[in-house]
Amino acid sequence: MLCRTQIVLRITSTCGQNMAEEVRMVFCGLRYITEQYVARRWTLQDVDMAEAFLRTHNFGFTEYPFPKHLFLKFIAESAEYFPMHIEALREGSVVYPYTPVFQIAAKDEYSSLITYLETVLLMAWYPSTVATLSRLSRAVIEDHCRESVDEDGRWTLETRMHDFGFRGCTCVGQSMIGGAAHLLSFDGADTLSAAFYARYRLNNGRPVATGIPATEHLVMTAYSSERQAMLSTIEAYGGGVFACVKDSYDYSRMLSEVLPVVTSKKLEKGGYLVICPDNYDQMEAMLLGLRAADKVFRSVVRGKGYRVVTGTSVIQGDGVTPESLRHILAAVHGAGYSAQSVWFVMGGGLLQKGNRDTMSMATKLSSITYADGETRDIMKLLKEGSEKVSLPGKFAMHADPDQGSASVAFCKEERRPARSESLLQAVYKGGPVDPNVWDGFATARQRVSDPWHIRN
């Protein structure tokens, strides 16, 4: 029997955050990978095609290893599904470095087939990285909302970070799983593929995301003037929440000359305008927009002593990271404005910029049972790189009340009667499991939120 375990080794500074301050990550996305690529039937035609492909996929005429007989055997024996057992943490679990997030096992001769699934399962690094980046961003915004947003305005937090990352993705599938990972922390998304997937595949048809009408440079430059573009947009969408990009030509001029001209039309419609600078210094653009909006629409000083601009806010989406969020929001507070008056957007930086090294996720051999019955727990411990240490054995995960209910690994054979059942649940048992094993999206969202606010 062979057992491989995926762990998070560490989170690196490429998240744009001081990792000495925050080292946790959000695990998610294995459901999509399991349902899409693992829990599928193999056919004899699939095996023949794989054999034909690998026969010529060689260098120097060295035979490429392909145990065709094992594929034919499990097709005949196990309803054509891969003969593996996969256990994983639940979607949305918050974990610390060196925490096993899934383990895959196979018995007897089938143990050699694990390598054929290892790479695709490891791709859970991607949605987990996006989910973690989104949660880190939310933590920064939450900190500033606690300081400057009154209780009756806290609901706006859910939309303060919007996903614009679809066009930066390599494919539709990436946008779906990455965008859905972001939606574990926020409601705002223009990545409709993710919003649709999360709603109908993960949440039983219940909505999970929101968006607003927004102009882009194409719209603003298609009109004879920016004034006409804004008036047309206000006429069409001014009764609700809508956004207009303001820097197709001259951001400062747009704020000082065009915005005052369309103010009466906006007030007549009674909606909520979001001012969008797209290519400008982050802090300067935010403060220019807030002051210009305050000048024409006025603001109100709320209970916490910060100004909330009436019916208007400014959104920043150029190069936003968790670290830049701190600087922007500090500048907003320094100017006397509430975090309620600003929104943020992440695009390729959310769905495309991260890589597997961002959180150093890896799958390692952790236990092996030989043909003679001897079991050996295996641990990688490189002399020149101790940060790449792996964990030995087969694991059970438990919520440890002594560590803020953090997920803690224990040897599977170790008896801990005071502990709950292992948090590693079977998500594939030689074939698909009952779909009810997977939690609904709302449950996963709550699973991210609750432990994140607990600090040891």
Image (cartoon, helix red, strand yellow):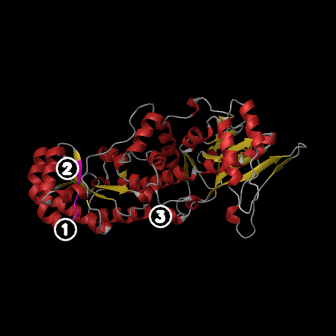
Residue type at mark 1: give it. Ser
Q: Which residue is mark 1?
A: 252
Mark 1: give few (<14), some (14-19) or many (20+) Cα within 10 Å.
some
Q: Which residue is found at the position 66% from the left and 35% from the top? A: 43
Q: Are marks 1 and 3 in contact (CB under 8 Å)?
A: no
Kindly state the secondary structure of the residue where label 1 is placed.
helix
Horizontal placement of 447 versus 63: left or right? left
Q: Which residue is found at the position 44% from the left and 34% from the top? A: 200
Q: Which residue is mark 2?
A: 311
Distance from disc 1 to disc 2, alpha carbons, whole Å, reads 20 Å
Name the image quarter holding residue 209: top left
Residue 1 or residue 389, whichever sits in front = 1
Kindly state the secondary structure of the residue where label 3 is placed.
loop
Mark 3: give few (<14), some (14-19) or many (20+) Cα within 10 Å.
some
Name the image quarter holding residue 109: top right
Which range is magenta? Answer: 242-250
Residue 148 or residue 340, whichever sits in front = 340
Q: Is residue 416 visible?
A: no
Distance from disc 1 to disc 3, alpha carbons, whole Å, reads 29 Å
Task: Indicate which label's residue lies in the foreground, 3 or 2.
Answer: 3
Q: Earlier in the sequence, mark 3 or mark 2?
A: 3
Horizontal placement of 122 versus 367: left or right? left
Residue 119 or residue 419, whichever sits in front = 119
Using the image, determine if residue 418 lies above or below residue 348: above
Q: Earlier in the sequence, mark 1 or mark 2?
A: 1
Distance from disc 3 to disc 2, alpha carbons, whole Å, reads 32 Å
Q: Which residue is mark 3?
A: 16
